[in-house]
Image (cartoon, rainbow, N blue to C red):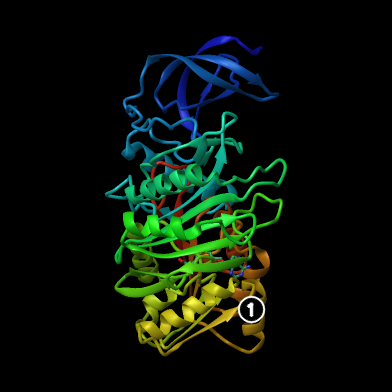
Amino acid sequence: MLKKNDLIQLKITSATAEGSGVGHSEEGVAVFVPLSAVGDELTVRILKVKKTYAFGKIEVVLLPSPARIEPDCPHFSRCGGCVWRHITYVEECRLKEQKVRDAIERIGGIRTEIKPMISCDQTDRYRNKAQFPVGKSRSGEVQIGFFAFHSHRIIDCADCVLQPQQFAEVIRVTRAFIERYDVSVYDEATGRGKLRHLYIRRAEVTDELMICYVVNGNGLKHEDVLIGQLRKVLPNMKTVIFNSNREKTNVILGKKNRVAYGDGVIEDELCGKRFRISPFSFWQVNRVQAEKLYSKAREYAALSGREQLLDLYCGTGTIGLTMADSCASLIGVEIIPDAVRDAEQNAARNGVTNARFICADAPAAAEQLCREGIVPDVVILDPPRKGCGEALVGTVSKMHPSRVVYVSCDPATLARDLKFFAAQGYVTREVTPCDMFSRTAHVESVALLEKR
Ligand code: SAH
């Protein structure tokens, strides 16, 4: 029997979706080893033993996997962002394809073609958004960075290689401001202190920056000085917003925004269309990959120009609006009011006149549309991680679309929902994974369903 502190030799034979390598001890117990690679032969120290599995850490790499590379970020393994910086990108794509295949087969019970990953040319600096917690160390040093893995301890990080270098400049200016004016930082334990988070977005095509300070209050003393500094260093800064969050919660954004500079929005481009983005609206974090994902979704939608298209969970309207010229009419549904306003303006901005948007909970709105006798030919689904759920799948099926294009950021809930669709007579024709989140454990996919 394995015991804590045992040293064992282990060959890593697979990896979990969360980024741990897995091998089997002599007794056949699965041992999870973070930061290992499939193919590694290791000496592992056992840290924790459960009934049917155990956790260990690498003591010695006896024989490295051919997929191993030297991690190139000093924060890797401490920060909760990347999990795959120690293996090649080819291997990462293989593991992510496997994750999608496993979910579809095991959770969904579905046999279908899983296409090769739509991979990235650029695995660093691809993110256009960051939310940095702001704190101070015990000795009073300002910390702006990331929460450590599974914790709320802030790891100070001057520059994250997944993000644009400009974000490091914003951090630098903010840090200097906090030090100069001795700005208090929020303490999660006591609920006291002013500055909670720094939230930044960059529109890649226009190079516009949105900088949002989340404060436990309305704003910051001397904020004009801060804005002046930011403008000086970052001439492309388009807008500065103060978000007020006085709740004792780990939800980052509060409900109220105050625009302190600019007009509170930035504008980016996707698939040749322009989109305005406000702070509460969802926007794909990897623009280059989003264009590839949308073009796959467009291929799956196979529009001829005559269809009625329903885009559920539409955000700022992007997927539907990039297809609006190929369908007769478009209805978008989204729950965040600011995103719906963005979607309406984005339609107008792009000369789209056959679209309307509804601000509502997607399952409820679909029910309502179904009662009104709306019969979409194609339905796009792009829910958050928790997926659509059985009720919405039921309602969509009742509308009898000939095709459903399901965009998902969680293979497990996708697989569950594909199974619900199968029970309603919809066949999953194929699934294409798309790497929107290189080096992290997350994987996006898009599935095509057709009515049997
Ligand atoms: N299709 C968009 C947005 C996808 S993200 C794009 O590609 O940019 C998922 C979206 O679903 C978010 O905008 C989120 O605000 C919205 N959402 C979350 N729960 C919802 C619900 N119950 N009903 C409708 N929209 C919801």
The residue beneath circle 1 is 365
Q: Check the picture and name the quadrant holding the N terminus.
A: top right
Quarter of the rendering containing residue 290: bottom left
Q: Nearer the viewer, residue 397 or 129?
A: 129
Residue 89 x/y as whole percent = 33, 39
The answer to whether residue 80 of the structure is visible from this angle is no
Position of residue 193 relative to residue 402, above or below, is above
> Residue at horizontal 64%, vertical 20%?
48
Q: Quadrant of the rendered structure where residue 291 is?
A: bottom left
- Is 4 situated above or below 372? above
| Above or below: residue 253 compared with residue 270 | above
Q: Which of 140 and 166 is in front in this view?
A: 140
Residue 409, how many percent across, how many down? 50, 55
Camera-side residue of 109 and 377: 377
Residue 440, x across and y down, in percent? 44, 42
Q: Where is residue 91, by image quadrant?
A: top left
Question: Is disc 1 surrounded by few (<14), some (14 to 19) or many (20+) residues within 10 Å?
Answer: many
The picture quadrant for ligand 1 comes to bottom right
* Image position of 405 (left or right of 26): left
| Residue 389 is at least partly visible in this image | yes
Of 441 and 392, the residue lying toward us: 441
Dot 1: what SS? helix
268 relative to 46, above or below: below
The reply, left or right, for residue 52 in relation to residue 262 is right
Amino acid type of disc 1?
Ala
Q: How far across and how far down the image is residue 367, in percent?
A: 66, 79
**Ligand 1 within 8 Å of the CB at mark 1:** yes
